[in-house]
Image (cartoon, rainbow, N blue to C red):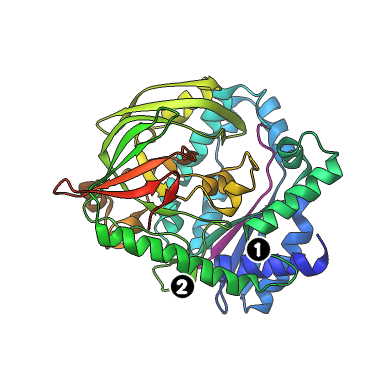
Amino acid sequence: MDDTMMHKYARLAVCAGTNVQKGQLLVIRAAAQDHEFVRACVQEAYAAGAGEVQVNWNDEMVGLMGYEHMDVQRLCDVPAWRLEQVRWEQEHKACYLHVESSTPGLLKDVDPRKVAMAQQAMMTAMKPYRAYTMASHGQWSIVAMPSAGWAAKVFPEQPLDKAVSMLQDAILAAVHVSPDNDPVAEWKEHDAQIARHCETLNAHHFAKLHFTNDLGTDLYVGLVPHHVWAGGAETSTSGVVFNPNMPTEECFCMPMRGGVQGVVHASKPLNYHGKLIDGFWLRFEGGRVVEYDAAKEKGTLTDLLDTDEGSRHLGEVALISYDTPISTSGILFYNTLFDENASCHLALGQAYPMNIVGGTSMSPEQLAAEGYNDSMNHCDFMFGTRDMSVVGIKEDGTEVPVFRDGNFVF
């Protein structure tokens, strides 16, 4: 990526993604291999008026070696200084930028129970701090950079240099960055289009949605009574507009915790904790997964579902037209940030309080009374297809077509 394009992308991430404010602390979480892009983000953040930028570096190969050589007890030991660091960041009203470039399936040869126990220990320790982003108390955003390991998975038949270049071009196209455009301005129009779909869905105020397709999905998803469809840009509780996911194409809402019934078949693999779960399906009764199977990594799927009780319930339902840029590219990214924006998707685990009227100011007890699902997980998986049909059902039983042949009808 040449310097001009890198700074254009960095400006988008900082100004439209996190939308760092004058004097605000920006915390960037990134792999060491992405240092050039991170430096560009730091430069653009200070140019936008950031008060301070801190970078928390990681390296996936170091992490892999830890899983291979450390015992479970040490892997599950979350040091107090890590929690104190996050507490300090949130007390100082930080915004967060995560740069994603991980290798899909990197942990495929690691004992899945070891990975599950370590991840659960971390999620348990960090749970008190998740509301800061889940309830949009502070801005946050995720963007991606190509890496050799990721590119080799996406384009296995290409020479590595060519594969990385192709993945780079696909990422930039997905986030609307090109040599001759203003991506920040283009994102404002993109957000406006998503907002128009959300306005229509909110006006209908469906009680539930019925999904069907030829894969075998036949699923009813009840929505919480005081639901709010959202998507694209979000607004923090302090009034700052930001884009959590770049790219994004979704309109999403909150399922009723006990209101999901039927079978759903995943349409794309799920990269979960470095392992690829593929060919899987879930059957829900009373909102809970009661039966499931997978062609690959069923054990990892079991670990996901058994993280806690909330992991067997849905926290999100998202509608995305099949004919969107990521979908029509024909690329399987093996990365949820991209693949979820090529397909309607569901999330197992924690819901977003913003999807309830007044939800970001509610107590946990008030949220639960509304039908909110709480969990240490929030794991998106894709189930949309070209032939997906979605019917909205109102309280009085009136049925309204929402999707036909995989796309919005309005």
Q: Which residue is mark 2?
A: 240
Task: Find residue 68 and report its image quarter.
Answer: top right
Q: Is residue 374 visible?
A: no
Secondary structure found at label 2: loop
Residue at (66%, 31%) from the top-left corner?
105
Residue at (16%, 45%) from the top-left corner?
397
Q: Where does the image place residue 185, in percent across and percent down from the top left?
A: 59, 74
Q: Which one is in front, 115 or 183?
A: 183
Decide whether residue 274 is among the magenta residues: no
Residue at (13%, 49%) from the top-left corner?
396
Residue 54, numbered circle? 1
Left or right of 180 on screen, residue 400? left
Q: Where does the image place residue 321, in percent across and percent down from the top left?
A: 47, 50
Closer to the observer: label 2 or label 1?
2
Q: Amino acid at mark 2?
A: Val
Q: Which one is in front, 220 or 365?
A: 220
Range covered by the magenta-colored residues: 92-105
Looking at the figure, which quarter contains the N terminus? bottom right
Q: Which one is in front, 94 or 184?
A: 184
Q: Where does the image place residue 237, in percent across and percent down from the top left?
A: 39, 68
Q: Amino acid at mark 1?
A: Gln
